[in-house]
Amino acid sequence: MRLAVLAAVAGVALLGACSNQPKYEFAEGACYFVATPDNEPPRLQKIADDQPQLEQCAARLEEMRLRFLRMGGSNQEIAGAYQGRFIFVDREGVKIGKSLTGSRFFAMARTGDGRLAIPGAIQRDETGRPIAIAAEPATK
């Protein structure tokens, strides 16, 4: 019985140590873009320093995503990292996770006019759809 318990504990420890996730070094306040070259492990590329919060890093990644789309790109999702958390920005909003392939948790949603906001701060109509906060453009 004791041998079986020791074998089980050793097996769990061995599996935990065999994670195929790459290990990254994160600088304090640095925001990274996660580059995923073909047939290579993902690597981090620093895009901004002195970011005080994860939300500011998400904003830098959103700027990058929109710039790529304006230049003719078609990739709707961009991944980044900030102080050990991974950030995923797409058309729906911002999700965060502890790894590139693990669970993602919703952090910011899009308002009716496309801006990013904390989900509780978004005004919604009776159907649940976001209401645009910005005024309608003036017609000529």
Image (cartoon, rainbow, N blue to C red):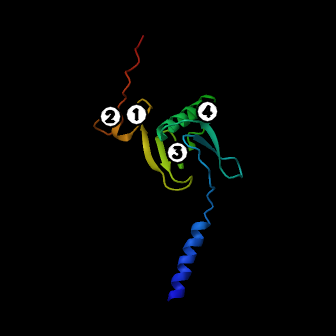
Query: Could you tell me which residue is drawn at 63 percent across and 34 percent down?
Result: 73
Is 83 located above or below residue 66 in the figure? below
Q: Residues within 10 Å of mark 3 (few under 14, many from 20)?
A: many
N-terminal-most mark, 4 or 2: 4
Viewer-nearest of discs 3 and 2: 3
Query: Could you tell me which residue is drawn at 32 percent across and 34 percent down?
Result: 123
- The residues tagged by marks 2 and 1 sit, at their Cα atoms, a distance apart of 8 Å
Identify which amino acid the numbered label 1 is placed on. Answer: Thr
Residue at the bottom extreme, as displayed: 1
User: Front-most of 15 and 102?
Assistant: 15
N-terminal-most mark, 3 or 4: 4
Element class at badge 3: strand
N-terminal-most mark, 1 or 4: 4
> Circle 2 is placed at which residue position?
123
Residue at the front extreme, as displayed: 28
> Where in the figure is residue 104, as x and y percent of width and height?
48, 51
Identify which amino acid the numbered label 2 is placed on. Answer: Gln
Q: Residues within 10 Å of mark 2 (few under 14, many from 20)?
A: some
Q: Are marks 4 and 2 in contact (CB under 8 Å)?
A: no
Query: Could you tell me which residue is drawn at 49 percent across and 38 percent down?
Result: 91
Viewer-nearest of discs 1 and 3: 3
Q: Residues within 10 Å of mark 1 (few under 14, many from 20)?
A: many
Query: Could you tell me which residue is drawn at 39 percent across and 32 percent down?
Result: 112
> Circle 3 is placed at which residue position?
87
N-terminal-most mark, 1 or 3: 3
Element class at badge 4: helix
Identify which amino acid the numbered label 4 is placed on. Answer: Phe
Q: How many discs appear? A: 4
> Circle 1 is placed at which residue position?
111
> Circle 4 is placed at which residue position?
68
> Where in the figure is residue 28, as x and y percent of width and height?
55, 43
